[in-house]
Image (cartoon, grey):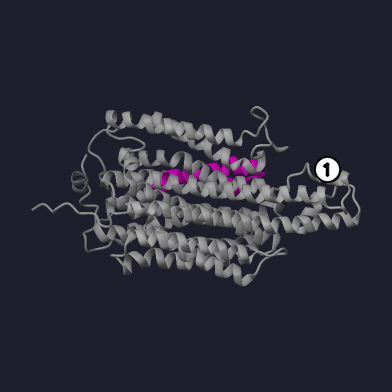
Amino acid sequence: MNATALAGHAGEAKPSADKFALLPIIVLVLAQMGATGDNGALSLAASALTHDLGATTSEIQLANMVYPLMGGAFMVAGGLAGTIIGWKRTFRIGAGLCALGEVACALAPNMMTFIWVGRVLVGFGASFLIPSLLGLIPLLYQGHNRTVAFGCIGAASGLSALLPLVLGVVMEAAGMHVTFLTLAAYFLVVLAASRGLSHVHQVDEKLKFDFLGVTLAAVGLFMFLVGVSSISSWGLVTPFEACPFTIFGISPALPLAACGVVVLIVLVHVEKGVEEKNGVALLPRSFLKTPQVLAGLVANALTFFFMGVQSILMAPYLQLVAGWSPVDVGMISIITGVPTFALALGIPKLAPHANPRHVIQAGYVIMAAALAIMSFSVTIEGCSVFGVYLGAFVAGVGAGTVSSHSSNVVALAVSDRDASQSGGIQTTMRNVGQAVGVALLGAVLLLGITGQVRAGALSDPTISPSVGEQVSQMSINLGSNEEFEHQIADIDMTEAERTSLVNIEARARFESTRVAYGVGAAIILLGLLTTPAIKTFEKKEAAPQA
């Protein structure tokens, strides 16, 4: 079906070119705020999860990972499902599943239930919800209004900073369980508000659901993300104590990730035949053959990679090492959110003819600068408050700048139907980016801390060889001096040895955190290599019929 026919079927639902419909975008923004705010709530809950459910740093990392893991595995499928059964229907399914998942998190008696029931349900719900809101925009808005609508969705990431602040107050006053019940109520409000979304006629042909493609995508992405996320707990090459099994004597993390990549390569070849046969595929050829689409997908991924870096480095360090409260960390979200909102919405609105390539390039540089500032805000015993606030503000400037055009450059480069379906692949890239950010930088952090503490314990002359040997068998979590002392309490040692170990661990977490920030900044700057492919800046609209 061509774009003109699609526009004709959706004629009653689409606002006119000079009138911007407010009600649909409000509903879509609320949904985006909830999905982003959920991640913020989990960051605030790091201390509560440790004390209430006995969570370790690795389990907190896994809880952060499962949401983007499920989203990354199934959001492409959610985008295809919306194309076939209707975006409004998949939107409502997603909101309901997210609400159910938040209830499961609130009532979870242990981390196993919290992660594998609550977080899985929320991630699966987001697989339907987020592709739907991005899929509806190309059908509801055209021309400059579409650019503004995509900017509003990017701005919603900034507005979502209000949720962590409110949820931080709730968490401090009523605890973690009430906080997640509050999030459940929020998603129920989004579900009720979705009745105000206009009906759009998307297709007039019977399309087949690509079960083979969905299976390959889910398996490939799941294997890749599980492998990458398990590096810090299973080991990079040498297996850790927590490693469940080995492959030829090495950790299974990298082999599992490599197998996932192989499955995804097979998926690309399979989808060519599926699209020719069925007319619709999980991965339309236009996504893979259009360099601008790939550059836009990278921009989506790097923005959420950046957010993943913040969630695994900044929030845990502030709470577990510097002793900040959930409300204090919630204030950081506001400082980041205000410029994110202002720039993601303001750039398309106030500078409609800005070059998207230059905007995204500037955003990458600013995000890397923000991570550099954050790294220098870290101290051995805590952090520099001014540095944290400055880094958070610059982070919002960078994220808002990239978000203002990251989705629209994809929509500009393909047909309306492919632009609508691209919501699934865009959100998959966002979740993959966030998952890789949490996994990769979490691995750099935890492997760095563990490696330096082990080496320091064995080389320090004040520490006996027997104590050094026992410490070298441990995996060290990110935490305060007191928490590290508790971790080594079972080892028989002198007070002088204990003091030396605490000093070694403090220096290790300080240096490893800075290195992790530096790695994150370098990866974001690599995104600049993709930006020359962004060449289509405006989309020619079909001529109106008499």
Amino acid of disc 1: Glu
Read off the magenta span. Answer: 104-131
The image shows residue 333 at horizontal and vertical percentages of 54, 64
Q: Is residue 296 left or right of residue 242?
A: left
Residue at point 66%, 51% (across, down): 49
Secondary structure found at label 1? helix
Residue at point 75%, 58% (across, down): 506
Residue 73 in the magenta stretch? The answer is no
Q: Dot 1: few (<14), some (14–19), or many (≥20) neighbours within 10 Å?
A: some
Dominant SS type (magenta): helix
Quarter of the image where one finds residue 208:
top left
Residue at point 68%, 35% (across, down): 243
Q: Which residue is mark 1?
A: 469
Q: Which residue appears farthest toward the right when viewing the image?
A: 494
Q: Is residue 502 left or right of residue 354?
A: right
In the image, 493 versus 316, the foreground residue is 493
The image shows residue 431 at horizontal and vertical percentages of 48, 47
The image shows residue 332 at horizontal and vertical percentages of 57, 66
Residue 112 in the magenta stretch? The answer is yes
The image shows residue 460 at horizontal and vertical percentages of 83, 52
Vertical arrangement, residue 74 with respect to residue 379, above or below? above
Can residue 201 be seen?
A: yes
In the image, 183 versus 284, the foreground residue is 284
Vertical arrangement, residue 264 with respect to residue 534, above or below? above
Q: Which residue appears farthest toward the bottom when viewing the image?
A: 386
In the image, 421 versus 189, the foreground residue is 421
